[in-house]
Image (spheres, rainbow, N blue to C red):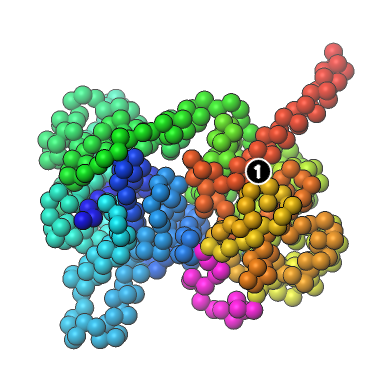
Amino acid sequence: MTKFIFVTGGVVSSLGKGITTASIAVLLEKRGLKVSIQKLDPYINVDPGTMSPFEHGEVYVTEDGAETDLDLGHYERFSHAAINRYSNATTGSIYSEVIRKERRGAYLGKTVQVVPHITNQIQEAIRQGAQRGIDVAIVEIGGTAGDIESLPFLEAIRQFGLKLGRGNVCYVHLTLLPYLKASGEMKTKPTQETVRKMREIGIQPDVLVCRCERPMTPEMRPKIAMFCNVTEENVIQEMDVSHTIYEVPLDLLREGLDDALVRILNLDDTAVADFTDWKELRRRFADPDGEIEIAVVGKYIELHDAYKSIYEALAHGAIHHSHKVRFRKISAESILDSSADQLLAGVSGLLVPGGFGERGLEGKIKAIQWARENEIPMFGICFGMQAMVIEYARNVAKIEGAHTSEVDPKCKAPVIDLMREQSGVEDKGGTMRLGAYPCRVIDGTRAAEVYGRDMVLERHRHRWEFNNDYKRQLERAGLTCSGIWEARGLIEVVEISDRPFYIGAQYHPEFKSKPLQPHPLFRDFIGAAIAFSHQDSENQQPKNEAVAAKES
Ligand code: GLN
């Protein structure tokens, strides 16, 4: 029988509930248990696909093509759980299902209400999210206890727990212990308050995970336990990490969270947890051999979450080489003709991520031109790859009027164009080319060397495509098409083959990178950047010496 862990949050948002949930999955998997992870989001959008990255951060795409919350990215990066379209449900998706059933007459004349119809549908979604054959289904509830929007979700998990009975369900509540500088102490009152709120709703948390910036003092634990009706050993401290979010599983392990969960759920765990790999990861993050700087030129640069998986994948690539990566985040719009050199000088690599629409595109193209001309390692993803094609078409192949028809539908040479099945699509939600498609990697290319395989599955989220009408012209000018979706003849990867790294991918490899298994493209992009930085400093040296000699 599958057991359930529900993770809720209190006091404030942004406590890192997603990372805590993902870490719980790691702890249980290390004890030999199979888990699934699911996120329930209280907002009304059916999925985050139509939201601006400024609202919600990146849209994370699953293998089966669902546009989901970015927390699912953490789940996949941390754990081995299979993440799919059932791994994320929202108020919007729940309601649209209930309304669809109501129109069909499925409620047999009843008045359709939040309780029981919406709460039943939420429980149905929870059952769907819990995959067959797993031991523990972990379910994170978005929002904060006390929000109007999250009430039906909390009511649903209360009922769900009641049906399953004690020993089969565990409620983990994440809370904050704020530190007051003026009095020099940490406060437990907000935690008592949020637990009181949970109990009013009918849920007694079994475990409290307490987020704090400094260690709890010895008298805090019994106090929290007593006021919140939780045993002392189930009060878990989760301090801010010092180097990386990938320390969190180890911190929670030290605090005994795995023991608490296994005890509460009467789990039959067999494996002796071996955390050697995670410890090695932490060691490398804490004590890297070197540091490099990568420029990321995008449209939503102010918000780290907008390119979450990209930054994570770059960090994975760097940690493979025992390096720390620094990001030079540059707003694409700020790059004008004259400023590319000034803004980009000194970086060891350039990454241009995905995006939509006109704003910033010309700046991205200028940055790419700068990287190509200066032979800097360059990695373009989705819109970034499309911008690489436009830049090459304009400046090398000399194709006049080269553009994407996304920005200029009447351009003379749409080197990036809409495919037939996409023209006429009016609905914005869930209608792009989404999810995993097979890509053949062409023998003898850089991409083939990087992957070491000839077939790969990578995830997509775009409407526009490389226009094959310009393939010959571009190839003749030196841009190699190194990956192709053969069934439709669509170009998935372009490169300059004799460069250490000048690759553009139409798909999003960042969604498949994990700290313990960096994606090969990110691994080798960073590898090329590190090599470039060494070469660059060697080239600088004689120059610097010459300058020094002159000055003296
Ligand atoms: N706007 C481009 C398209 O739809 C690229 C999308 C993206 O970068 N995710 O094709």
Describe the element under mark 1 as helix, strand or loop.
helix
Span shown in magenta: 420-435
Amino acid type, residue under disc 1 in the picture: Phe
Residue 487 relative to residue 402: left or right = left
Mark 1 and ligand 1: say if the CB distance to the nearest ligand atom is below 8 Å: no
- Give how far across and how far down residue 93 sits, in percent: 35, 69
Q: Most prominent secondary structure in the magenta stretch?
A: loop
| Quarter of the rendering containing residue 275 | top left
| Residue located 28% across and 62% down the image | 126
Frontmost residue, 47 versus 227: 47
Q: Could you tell me if residue 158 is visible in this image?
A: no
| Residue located 30% across and 34% down the image | 272
- Give how far across and how far down residue 538 sits, in percent: 77, 26
Q: Is residue 343 above or below residue 82?
A: above
Residue corresponding to mark 1: 525
Quarter of the rendered structure image containing ligand 1: bottom right
| Residue located 16% across and 33% down the image | 232
Q: Is residue 24 above or below residue 274?
A: below
| Residue located 52% across and 72% down the image | 431
Frontmost residue, 300 versus 388: 388
Q: Is residue 43 above or below residue 21?
A: below
Q: Is residue 431 magenta?
A: yes
Q: Could you tell me if residue 134 is visible in this image?
A: yes
Quadrant in the picture for the C terminus = top right
